[in-house]
Amino acid sequence: MNTTRPGGLLNAIKALNYAKQKGMGAAINDQPLGIGSAMDIHLVAAKYFYFNYATELFGYEMFEDDLIKNPLEYKNGTVKVPEGPGWGVQLDEVALDKYSTSPTISLKQ
């Protein structure tokens, strides 16, 4: 389970609630970039007792860049819940430009 496969955070919470009602276990194992990891970490922190298995987030080991300014603090099998606005991470605009494959599209009202 993670926040992307069910179609976002709200659907992930619905899936967790359903699993909990049915007595099923849950785990997060994913390889996201920094912002995805931050979202997964916040979900696990908020719904800690819904998870019966260890969380595995290891995208930071698989990718050249995590696309966030300050890396998440992994240490001794744990990670610190990011603090601050949004998911507690700030996107690295320079890295986004470096790895972009097409021009940025801005939506305006």
Image: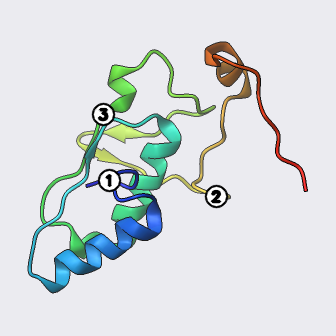
Q: Quadrant of residue 95?
A: top right
Instruction: Give, as a three-letter code, the residue at label 3.
Output: Phe
Question: How many residues crowd mark 3 within 10 Å: few (<14), some (14–19), many (20+)?
Answer: some
Would you name the residue on which mark 2 appears? 86
Q: Residue at x 41, y 20 (%)?
A: 63
Would you name the residue on which mark 1 appears? 2
In the rendered image, the residue lying farthest to the right is 109
Q: Quadrant of residue 93?
A: top right
Element class at badge 3:
loop
Quarter placement of the C terminus? bottom right
Tell which tag, 1 or 2, sits nearer the viewer: 1
Q: CA distance from mark 1 to mark 3?
A: 13 Å
Q: Quadrant of residue 50?
A: bottom left
Element class at badge 1:
loop
- Disc on the earlier residue, 3 or 2: 3
Would you name the residue on which mark 3 appears? 58
Instruction: Give, as a three-letter code, the residue at label 1.
Output: Asn
